[in-house]
Amino acid sequence: MEIVYWIAVALLGVLYVYAGGAKLVRSREQLLPLMQWVQDTPMPAVRAIGAIELTGVAGLVLPPLLGIAPWLALAAAIGFVLLQLFATRVHLARGEGLAGIGINLVLIVLALAAIAAWLGSDW
């Protein structure tokens, strides 16, 4: 199960480091082509979401890797599921339909895989 966990974490990590980093350093105009929801969202909130995403990646990777408070990895994975559920709600409220929530569903599945692998491990 550890291998499944690390595969899920690697995929989540790549996606969230990219998305979270972009939200932290790019302007609204640079984000708009990929994330239309930033048009209606205050930039401090967009930056906060980016910081939460990067912190979540650290929470998935560092505790199991270092063996310190490994329960934090489970909390981070659950946090990602909640984040994506709220993101799905935003996309549906904006009328984006299934096309707008596809990546959210993929990220939910990956986070759930990480949770399942963590629960099935010896951590």
Image: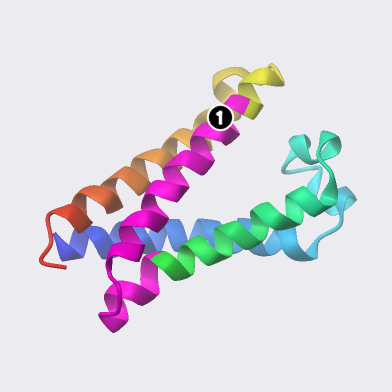
Q: Main secondary structure of the magenta part?
A: helix
Residue 1 in picture, x, y percent from top left: 13, 59
| Amino acid beneath label 1 | Thr
Magenta stretch encompasses residue 82: yes
Q: Residue at x 28, y 73 (%)?
A: 64
Determine which quarter of the picture holds residue 108.
top left
Judged left or right of residue 40, residue 75 is left
Q: Residue furthest bottom?
A: 66
Q: Residue at x 42, y 67 (%)?
A: 59
Judged left or right of residue 7, residue 83 is right
Q: In the rendered structure, which segment of residues is drawn in magenta?
A: 60-89
Residue behind mark 1: 88
Element carrying mark 1: helix
Magenta stretch encompasses residue 86: yes
Residue 35 in picture, x, y percent from top left: 73, 41
In the image, residue 71 sits, relative to residue 30, either above or below, namely below
- Front one among 111 and 7: 111
